[in-house]
Amino acid sequence: MSVLRTPRPVATFTTVALAVVLALSAAGPAGAQDKKKASTDAAVEKGLEWLKRTQEPNGAWTQGGGQYTTAATALAGLALLMEGSTPKEGKYSDQLSKAVDWFLKRSQTNGLLGTPATEGGRYIYGHGFGMLFLACVYGEEEDPATRRKLEAMLKRAVEFSGKAQTRQGGWGYVSAADGSDFDEGSTTITQLQGLRACRNAGIVVPKSVIDRAVEYLRKSTTSRGGVIYNLGPGGQAAQAGGERPAITAAAVACGFSSGNYDDKYAKMWIKYCKDSIWQNGRLQSSGFDDYQNYYFGQAVFVLGDDRYGKLFPDDKKDSWITWSKFKDATFAHFAGTQASDGSWNGGYGGPVFTTAFNLTLLQLEKNILPFYHR
């Protein structure tokens, strides 16, 4: 704009036009970014308000038919924590306080979080998400009495997870005893993230439990770099052709949550995700898109805009998986597919799951919860 303020008596048309063009070109990208951020912020606010309105009087969230209550309550609680509220202060403190109280009242004597009867025969999911949520609450809790309650509950929860682990090191939909030692990838990752959140918060987690679970995921990795659904009896090498993109994306996020970026298997998982999920800068459908995108987004957030290049220096820059590209490919879609009431539906798990998943991704850049930091 300094051209327009020239001390010369008369500015030529060419000079003025050039100044306007320069000003618009400088403001354009910033203006576009501001517009995108405003759209994201509006979607987040609508989504959080929907969660607030749909919380049950007892503090829980539930899916259709009153199922998956433990998992839904934990995931909704995480989304509210990521806004910046805590059970003691903030816009959603009342909702978070009620959610924590719901867990405190329904923790089983054996350490299982929540109520098994409401989990559709898959209570291990709720237990894992519950540990993640409560560990994040515990890490920021300052009231001594509440901390003692949470600490005792989380210690029992960690002990339950250790006992529920199968002989091969994974977890199934229920404990090893209840499920005849069956295990599979998605529940294994849910447990691993929950246990790591507990450990990060200062709760003692046996190293052997973590190590066995990590080895389970490695054994479940095929020569193509993808993770299969179930390792099967005997722990034989995973066969190519049975890879699950969504579980592989979850494995990347799980590996990154431990700070393990340069591991051989993490690199294999990233490459597989690039080929199966992230083709030409666009997300591909796997049939479990909300679950897939939830974990893949967490992994890409950790990659940022330059870590992929450090992991794979021989790859061309325009082929890198970056957070900026992921945002461009997904955030506008999230805003455009949000229902008028603030929820998201159409996902595999139902509106509470999908809304909480999307709100988690949309709020990663706030860097509120240490568990999701880069």
Image (cartoon, helix red, strand yellow):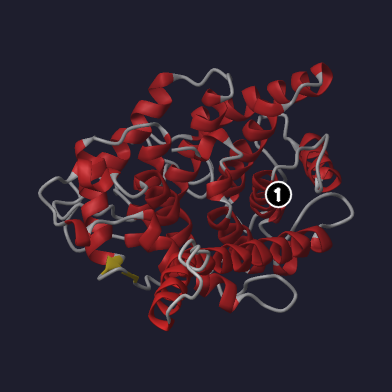
Q: Eyeballing the image, is 288 above or below 305?
A: below
Q: Residue at x 41, y 20 (%)?
A: 207
Read off the residue under disc 1: 80
Res 346 quadrant in image: bottom right
Q: Residue at x 72, y 66 (%)?
A: 46
* Label total for image: 1
Q: Nearer the viewer, residue 130 or 26?
A: 26
Which quarter shows the C terminus? top left
Q: Nearer the viewer, residue 355 or 288?
A: 355
- Residue reaching furthest to the left: 314
In x, y percent, where is residue 64?
71, 69
Q: Eyeballing the image, is 150 above or below 34?
A: above
In x, y percent, where is residue 16?
45, 76
Q: Eyeballing the image, is 12 above or below 187?
A: below
Q: Which residue type does callout 1 highlight?
A: Leu
The reply, left or right, for residue 155 in relation to residue 235 is: right
Question: Does residue 353 show up?
Answer: yes
Q: Residue at x 29, y 55 (%)?
A: 228
Q: Eyeballing the image, is 137 above or below 358?
A: above
Label 1 sits on a secondary structure element that is: helix
In x, y percent, where is residue 169?
37, 34
The reply, left or right, for residue 331 in relation to residue 83 is: left
The reply, left or right, for residue 115 in relation to residue 54 is: left
- Residue reaching furthest to the bottom: 13
- Residue reaching furthest to the right: 57
Question: Does residue 184 show up?
Answer: no
Label 1 crowd (10 A; few <14 / some 14-19 / many >=20): many
Q: Residue at x 40, y 41 (%)?
A: 254
In x, y percent, where is residue 7?
50, 63
